[in-house]
Image (cartoon, rainbow, N blue to C red):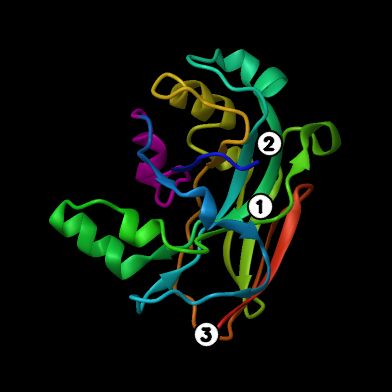
Amino acid sequence: PVGRVFCIGRNYPWSPEDRNAASAFPSWFMKPNTAVFLAEGVLPFPPATQDFCHEVELVVGIGKGGFNIAREQVESEHVWGYAVGLDLTRRDLQKIAKTQGGPWEPAKAFDASAPCSPMMPVKVCGHPHRNPIWLYINEQERQRAIIADLLFSVPDLIATLSKSVTLLPGDLIFTGTPVGVDAMQPNDHIHAGISGIGEIRMQVGA
């Protein structure tokens, strides 16, 4: 069963300066596991926002938990599989939280804010490194990168995160999104994916 949902903040270079500044571990926040659902059909347009944004991400499923996990053991022992996910954001509420120094839950932890493709077992897909990740809205490309562009790799993320919290089987980790985040409108068509992992096709609801 899905456990906790950890989301990593800025973990792709959105500018040349980001690559040079990637010395500190990125921020992370959480969503409730009730935000996770199979990414198909209609994506509900959430209330209380005029700036509903997409963030396509590689999602890691933890199979074996642990505390202070060694980096070299992450892929061989602790990752069960991978999926494609959308870390959906009420960006206008996030901007208010940043300005006021408030929590991000209103912007990030709302209902249906973490749709995912089916989880692909590692024994089937292997560990993604050079795989392209991308997102289209209405057949127009908005986001594209490769998994190797991550400022902190999956082993780095899991090893470092496990120094702060004990990871458990069923925990999901959204690993960050490439540049190109933008707003969606009702009836927009979403097509996103990671080569070798899966694809998402959804339509934004009214």
- Residue at image position (42%, 44%) is 30
The residue beneath circle 2 is 129
Circle 1: residue type: Val
Circle 2: residue type: His
The residue beneath circle 1 is 84
- Residue at image position (45%, 27%) is 161
Secondary structure of the residue carrying tag 2 is loop
**Picture coordinates of residue 65, whole percent (x, y):** 59, 22
Distance in Å between CA atoms under marks 1 and 3: 22 Å
Q: Residues within 10 Å of mark 3 (few under 14, many from 20)?
A: few
81, above or below 9, in the image: above
The answer to which of 50 and 36 lies nearer the viewer is 36
Circle 3: residue type: Pro
Which quadrant holds residue 75?
top right
Q: Is there CB contact under 8 Å for labels 1 and 3?
A: no
Q: Residues within 10 Å of mark 1 (few under 14, many from 20)?
A: many
Question: The N terminus appears in which quarter of the rendering?
Answer: top right
Magenta span main SS: loop
The residue beneath circle 3 is 186
Q: Is there CB contact under 8 Å for labels 3 and 2?
A: no
124 sits to left or right of 108 = right
Secondary structure of the residue carrying tag 1 is strand
The answer to which of 69 and 151 lies nearer the viewer is 69
Distance in Å between CA atoms under marks 3 and 2: 34 Å
The answer to which of 13 and 59 lies nearer the viewer is 59
Q: Residues within 10 Å of mark 2 (few under 14, many from 20)?
A: few
Which quadrant holds residue 190?
bottom right
**Picture coordinates of residue 110, whole percent (x, y):** 42, 62
Q: Which residues are magenta?
A: 8-24
User: In the rendered structure, which disc, 3 or 2, sits on the residue that comes first in sequence?
Assistant: 2
